[in-house]
Image (spheres, helix red, strand yellow):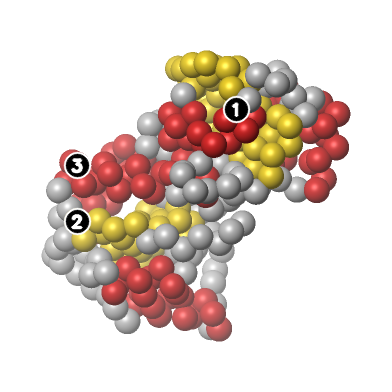
């Protein structure tokens, strides 16, 4: 498939047109020289677009890098300093860049949040958590009650550890809300929904006493760790449906 054909494929189920308040320039952020002609035979997937992921994607023989966090966020960027290095890593290797931010957070079933919901065993998850008027997370009831430690273990990959666990709620958790990434302040929405626990990527100092006083459990699984989910689900979908070769580029930040 060509780059433009892949763009149509991704748009057919990620529907970026439904997320117009997202500042990310969702879709093709850097094209290749011949987007209607050059066949894409291998796609690399990563959480972040940066010089390191671009160079590794080229080293792996990919013609396209698909990421959650792209390079362009709506404003005008000057191509100098480290930003030039990032863009040049794509341009000099004729490597295309495809970014999908909020549409990948919110997608059911291939997004970060519904993917996490599936991991922990949420029954019939439904939309939860709004950002700039867009529903991005999901909530639901667990198949069986879990402790906060058990819930954190199920949410992450084997060997991964959460950044923080704030266990200020019920000992046995039944209802959970999920918003990946940097959504610590959205614990307020979980409290308003009277949920037993809230899973996100990171939490700030300013949320600590709010969480404690409201009596809710919060798991900060790591911004990076909670957002490897969606790109890997898209990777699996591409392999199954398109038969293309893929690779996941894992460059954890520890944050």
Relative to residue 96, is residue 26 drawn left or right? Answer: right
Residue 28 on image: x %, y %? 35, 58
Q: How far apart are marks 3 and 2 (CA)?
A: 10 Å
Residue 129 on image: x %, y %? 60, 31
Relative to residue 224, is residue 40 drawn left or right? Answer: left
Whether residue 253 is situated above or below residue 213 in the rendered picture: below
Residue 69 on image: x %, y %? 49, 57
**SS at circle 1:** strand
Residue at numbered disc 3: 240
Whether residue 164 is situated above or below residue 194 in the rendered picture: below
Relative to residue 71, is residue 244 drawn left or right? Answer: left
Residue shown at 25% from the left, 66% from the top: 62
Marker disc for residue 245 = 2
Residue shown at 21% from the left, 47% from the top: 239
1 or 2: tag closer to the N-terminus: 1
Q: How far apart are marks 1 and 3 (CA)?
A: 30 Å
């Amino acid at each position: 498939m060509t780059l433009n054909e892949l763009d149509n494929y991704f748009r057919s189920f990620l529907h970026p047109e439904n997320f117009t308040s997202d500042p990310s320039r969702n879709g093709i952020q850097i094209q290749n020289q011949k987007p209607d002609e050059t066949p894409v035979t291998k796609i690399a997937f990563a959480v972040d677009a940066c010089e390191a992921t671009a160079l590794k994607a080229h080293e792996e023989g990919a013609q396209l890098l698909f990421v959650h966090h792209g390079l362009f966020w709506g404003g005008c960027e000057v191509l100098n300093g480290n930003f030039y290095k990032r863009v040049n890593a794509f341009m000099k290797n004729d490597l295309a860049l495809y970014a999908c931010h909020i549409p990948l957070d919110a997608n059911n079933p291939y997004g970060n949040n519904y993917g996490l919901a599936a991991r922990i065993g949420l029954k019939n998850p439904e939309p939860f958590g709004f950002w700039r008027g867009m529903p991005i997370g999901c909530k639901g009831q667990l198949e069986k009650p879990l402790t906060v430690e058990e819930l954190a273990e199920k949410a992450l990959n084997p060997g991964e550890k959460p950044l923080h666990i704030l266990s200020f709620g019920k000992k046995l958790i039944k209802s959970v809300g999920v918003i990946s990434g940097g959504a610590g302040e959205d614990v307020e929405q979980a409290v308003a929904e009277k949920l037993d626990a809230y899973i996100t990527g990171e939490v700030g100092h300013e949320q600590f006493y709010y969480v404690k006083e409201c009596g809710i459990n919060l798991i900060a699984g790591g911004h990076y760790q909670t957002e490897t989910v969606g790109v890997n689900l898209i990777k699996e979908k591409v392999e199954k449906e398109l038969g293309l070769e893929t690779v996941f580029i894992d460059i954890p930040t520890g944050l």
